[in-house]
Amino acid sequence: MKLVVVAHGHFATGAASALELIGGKQEDVAVIDFSEGMSAQTVKEKIAAELENQSEVLVLTDLLGGTPFKVSTELMTTFNGKMNVLSGLNLAMLIEAVFARNMLDFDELVDKLVNTAKDGVVHAQSLFAAEDQEDEFEGGI
């Protein structure tokens, strides 16, 4: 399965750099930055080039409704294999995608990534409050 990471500015490159730092160099991961001055057509062409000779492609984008998402979903309608496009790219999602893609089938991976991205968003106060409550009960009655 090929992963294509597409985002505004240098977000895609940054996420891929963090992934490499954590998990090493990865195969079948393409990174496309939607940089200032680049047209939607250019981004679409770069993504289309990554789809060639692929049977399964998962595109991870930053913003729902943004140009990377829109052009990826346009390409999805004509792709001859399995393809899906997810928005809300975060590092947890990308790491999970890389390491789980060979263990899950395509649709299971998509569902897992959506949950991973959602579950990875927490605020520290509630997290620490839950830990404090657990500590209170350790001593028993």
Image (cartoon, rainbow, N blue to C red):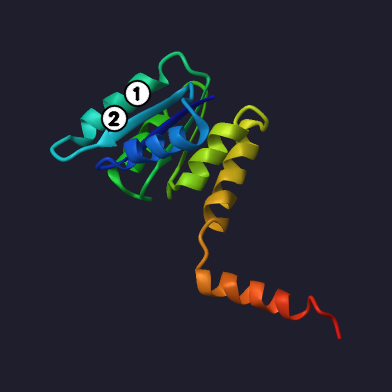
**Residue 48: mark:** 1
Is label 1 in a helix, a strand or a loop? helix
Is label 2 in a helix, a strand or a loop? helix
Q: Is residue 59 something one can see in this rendering?
A: no
Q: Which residue is mark 2?
A: 44
| Residue 17 percent location from the top left of the image | 38, 35
**Residue 79: mark:** none
Q: Is residue 64 left or right of residue 93?
A: left
Query: In the image, what residue occupies the spot 56% across and 44% down?
Result: 113
> Marks 1/2: CA distance?
6 Å
Q: Quadrant of residue 29?
A: top left
Is 10 rendered above or below residue 116?
A: above
Mark 1, other Cα within 10 Å: few <14 / some 14–19 / many ≥20: some
| Residue 75 percent location from the top left of the image | 38, 30
Residues at discs 1 and 2 in contact (Cβ within 8 Å):
yes
Query: In the image, what residue occupies the spot 13% across and 38% down?
Result: 37
Q: Amino acid at mark 1?
A: Ala
Q: Is residue 43 left or right of residue 74?
A: left
Most foreground residue, 108 or 97: 97
Q: Find the residue positioned furthest to the top.
A: 53
